[in-house]
Image (cartoon, grey):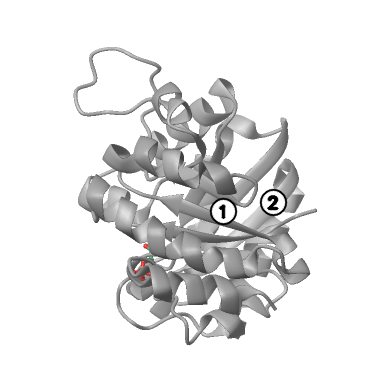
Amino acid sequence: MKKNIIAANFKMNKTNKDIEGYFDIFARNINELKNKSSFAGTEIVFAPPFTSLCEAYRIIKPFESFIKLSSQNIYYEQSGAYTGEISLDMIKNCGCVYAIVGHSERRNIFGESDELVANKVSAVYNNGGIIPILCVGENLEIRNKNGQEKFVENQLNIALNSIKGKNITSLIIAYEPIWAIGTGIPIKPDDGEAMHRFIYDYIKSNFLIDELRIIYGGSVTESNISALMIEPHIDGVLVGGASLDPAAFFNIVKLSIV
Ligand code: 13P
């Protein structure tokens, strides 16, 4: 069964100590939900900073069947003289099953090119055992010119170049329009659905992916999650700011069950 994904991207927030306190509260709440049949179609994903991955894994292990771990980034080489970088084997060793690749903050603040993102996607599939959460999305200038489809199509085409013609078991695309990230202005559900449908059709006609999930990110909160999740091509969300408070994120998970 294709499960919806409700993912928390902590970005550069929370120490190990904070993570312990966070999961204490979250775990207490999740016990209330976990036996509900409506919850069976949901997977919760946490992407804490690298420094907390192993600690987070230790805490979520009892809930491993429905709470998974993701890194916020990876480097494409396996090992070597790459000061400050983290390899796929390192995150796997801390219990990750997902890796966010090409987040717009990596692209825009740290200058990650489409080609670098493509190398990372390629490395994830070559290494095995990790599913990429590939982020794409246009800025406001492009949206105002109605160029979002062309822009995202180009991002997908470059990033997924290495898997053209290959049979791939699972891929997650996070559609995160830059103008919606951290602004308090989420996409309107029908505009989100239109873009997700476009991405779905584009990938289905150009790639061989068994399980494709397309999740939305950008100012998701308790007040807009239900309306987003009703849309047929929105398979979940990637939450930044509102995931930092365990009670708020728990409510987002709860309200996502439609
Ligand atoms: P916000 O939810 O803070 O807008 O962040 C979205 C995001 O970038 C998730 O990766």
Residue 245 picture quarter: bottom left
Relative placement, left or right, of 146 versus 80 is right
Mark 1 residue's CB less than 8 Å from ligand 1: no
Residue at point 24%, 20% (across, down): 82
* Image position, residue 167 (x, y; %): 75, 32
Residue type beneath disc 1: Ile
Q: Please tell me which residue lies in front, 146 or 256.
A: 256
Estimate how packed mark 2 is, as few (under 14), some (14 to 19) or many (20 or more) residues with alpha carbons within 10 Å.
some
Q: Label 1, secondary structure: give it.
A: strand
Estimate how packed mark 1 is, as few (under 14), some (14 to 19) or many (20 or more) residues with alpha carbons within 10 Å.
many
Number of numbered discs on residues? 2
Q: Are marks 2 and 1 in contact (CB under 8 Å)?
A: yes
Q: Is residue 215 above or below residue 50?
A: below
Residue 173: numbered disc = 1
Q: Quadrant of ligand 1?
A: bottom left
Q: Earlier in the sequence, mark 2 or mark 1?
A: 1
Q: Which residue is mark 2?
A: 212
* Image position, residue 184 (x, y; %): 33, 82
* Image position, residue 196 (x, y; %): 62, 67
Q: Label 2, secondary structure: give it.
A: strand
Q: CA distance from mark 2 to mark 1?
A: 8 Å
The answer to whether residue 15 is visible is: no
